[in-house]
Amino acid sequence: MRGITKRFGPVVANDHVDFEAAWGEVHALVGENGAGKSTLMSILAGLYRPDSGTIEIDGTPVRFRSPRDAIEHGIGMVYQHFMLVEPFTVAENVVLGERRSTVDLGLPRVERELAELSERYGLGVDPKAHIWQLSVGEQQRVEILRLLYLGARILVFDEPTAVLTPQEATSLIRTLRGLAAQGFSVIFISHKLDEVMEVADCISILRRGQIVATTAPNETDRRTLARLMVGRELAALVEHPAVEPRDEREPGETVLALRGVGAIGEKGLPALRDVDLAVRAGETLGIAGVAGNGQSELAEVVTGLRRVTNGTVTIAGRDMTNRPAAEVARAGVAHIPEDRLATGLIGGMDLSANAILREYGRPPLSSGPFLAGQQVNTFTDRLISDHDVKAPGRWAKLRTLSGGNQQKLLLGRELAGSPRLIVAVHPTRGVDIGATEAIHEELRRQRASGAATLLISEDLDELLALSDRIAVLFDGRVMGVLPARGADPEQIGLLMAGVAADAASQTETRSAADG
Amino acid sequence: MASVPLLRGYRIERVPAPSRLATALVSLLSLLLALVFGGIVLALAGENPLTVYQTMLRGALGDWNGVAETLVKTTPLLLAGLGVAVAFRMQLWNIGAEGQLYLGAIFATGTALFLIPTAPGWVMVPAMIVAALIGGGLWGFIPGALRAWFGASEIITSLMLNYVAILFSEYLVHGPWRDPQAYGFPGTPTLPDAAWLARWGTTRVHLGLLFGLIAAVTLWVMFRRTRWGYEIGVMGENPRAAHYAGMPTKRTIILVMVLSGALAGLAGMSEVAGIGHQLQRNLSPGYGYTAIIVAWLARLHPFGAVLVAFLLAVLTVGGDQLQMSLGLPAAIAPMLQGTILFFLLGGDLLTRYRLTRVLGVG
């Protein structure tokens, strides 16, 4: 791939990227969230078309109009979310991708060929099994089998181990090595440096849409890789205006305490394991981690939206383990959720309806079964003006506002009752710089007035600028807790990638967890 | 990737906020197009469309008698339509208004004939209303509870309960509740006089219409001014936000389905007590299904339902007139209703979504 550029609106996802992979090797593509890895690979697999740049296979330029084109040229991709039809069998799913005949699917022939392929590459997939009967790891092997059957010679995997148990991941890694040994070209996207060092022949690091280095495991170490991945932060931090001297007051009493908390995630796998964390009044605890390592579940557990399976959640001295969300909110917990439009706001309703979502059940906004119309209007107008929400009026549909203004409204609503605990998840994701500053300012003000804050973010800048301490989550566990002041982004990067022991200076891990 | 591929190089996008004027204009234009299209079909069938439309209008609105009959047909459509709209507001697809209507009629009839047959009117009518609300509400409770507790699709369960209710009513009028003096004709005995709803002058327009109007105003107030109405709105628009705010989703699903069924049940009671004065076969010619059209065309707005129920009643009464004075097949009116619905829903899609050219793809 040469000079690949892809823009989404004003965002440049890939900026003149040159990328080469060889036959018979496993090539790892690493980088932070939003570095452009998935975009680059989606271009290779024919899902997106590049704005400029070319793709060559064995020196021959190719152009793909669709994933079908790509697969005809031998390039196939295994996505994080499998493209399988659950009630169908393995063979039926494979035939879905074909259009040779509409009358006779030739299933017996397909089943025979699949069984042979499965045997040859040691995939252990039964072509007659129904997808719903298979585990996630097996389904992933079905995807691989399908690509092999369709003639793919270059196999691309988008974070293949993210959805797997450790045992399944080990077995997948063995499969990837096997495929490379048989001459296939295997490209895989990952955040996990341990795994990258173990499986890859070649490693390319993508940062802010550009390839910053291509190296090999025997020429580098995890520390260097982590620095290359998050390196920019190191430089930017020095001159970042947001890092002001924090007032170093002693934080107050413990507001939030998690003890031995475990929870099950959406996929039915453990998402949090034995988490001990504490946040005190006037303190901000940042949570760093690569997406999908338990951050969402952590926020949900604290705000009463997800049940814990082990351990206890204590808020302001009261046991709030598995209490309903409304009760948690009444105890003074504000929640700025991860995906504001999907969770925290109602796009199809007007600003008033969105403004009163927390307070509608209490006076002065309601009296008896009725909403107090006049009070609702004043309340909304005040929220709009206090938080500088740019909107045509309170009657406007929320969906018509920009992301930043939506977020300011949400923030204003959540912080209205001077909360004791603020759970903020990616509070500035997808909002412009001006709104980001306003949101940061608001969070600092809340901290100064004594609120405890649990700040979950993938933006290290943001975490370092706002937090007093930073806890790193990996695979549902707290890998370590570091003071934010003078924290080493490299070390955070290593912890985020699941590298714990050798990173030394682990003195804080346990003691700091208790506040 | 959230768009729907339709034509190569184009995609359908959601319009963030369709303006009221655009919505109204599109509805009007859709109605016009539907009449033109219906006219073409009529012309192909060898009829003069203008004569047909004129006959329909004159039949439904040409004289007081016509208007009165139109209001009679408006009544059950309005009550059942409001019931459907309540559920649809919360994205609960209650297709069971027909069965709920029958259950309301059965409960009301049973109350008047067997429970308190000698009660005076001021006891009888309220008692029948309560019975109908309970009966319809029960028929809404079942799919509501199945949905809330087990996640069963209320579309299927409410639809299937329609058959149960209709066949149960058949059983009653042929069997245990049949009037012994009716020479074997199916149907219950006539209700006591105290159970008859007051009528307006010599017309068949009865108190049920007032029930419908009161219900419309009450629902409007409920949606606009009460906490419960607000919660229903939030749960309908974004269930995750409702969960996030800690709203009691399961309880509300059940209550909304009960309310929805109760309103349809009231429609059944008002047909029995206002028109038939007995429970008979074919009590409803599908009011509960037409109610879905009412709710949808009214965009789930209570006052919109008043208007749409009236318009559909015009089509029904006018359609009857076609049979009587022009000798046209009975299928003409439903055909026109279907055409209008088709065009209105199509127009609705155009106000909410737009076709845009996608650059650089295809």
Image (spheres, grey):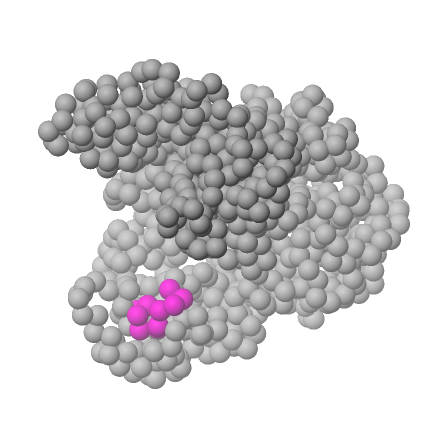
Instruction: From the top left corner, tell me how far across and down residue A169 is, in percent.
Output: 52, 73
Residue closest to the eye, B289 or B64: B64
Question: Does B179 appear in magenta?
Answer: no
Which residue appears at 66% of the width and 57% of the height? Answer: A306
Question: Does A90 appear in magenta?
Answer: yes
Q: Say if residue B100 shows up in the picture.
A: no
Query: Does residue A430 sit above or below A160 in this rendering?
Result: above
Residue closest to the eye, B123 or A9: B123
Span of residues in magenta: A85-94
In the image: residue A381, left or right of residue A515? left
Which residue appears at 31% of the width and 63% of the height? Answer: A75
Give the residue furthest to the top: B63
Q: Residue A437's quadrant in the figure?
A: top right
Residue closest to the eye, B232 or B261: B261
In the image: residue B242, left or right of residue B200? right
Q: Residue A258's quadrant in the figure?
A: bottom right
Residue closest to the eye, A118 or A346: A346
Query: Does residue A59 sit above or below A360 in this rendering?
Result: below
Instruction: From the top left corner, tell me how far across and down residue B215 is, in percent.
Output: 56, 30
Where the C terminus of chain B falls, by quadrant?
Answer: top left
Instruction: Count numbered badges in the picture.
Output: 0
Q: Say if residue A146 shows up in the picture.
A: yes
Which residue appears at 70% of the width and 71% of the height? Answer: A501
Instruction: From the top left corner, tell me how far across and down residue B238 is, in percent.
Output: 55, 42
Query: Does residue A134 sit above or below B203 in this rendering?
Result: below
In the image: residue B161, left or right of residue B337? right
Which residue appears at 51% of the width and 46% of the height? Answer: B106
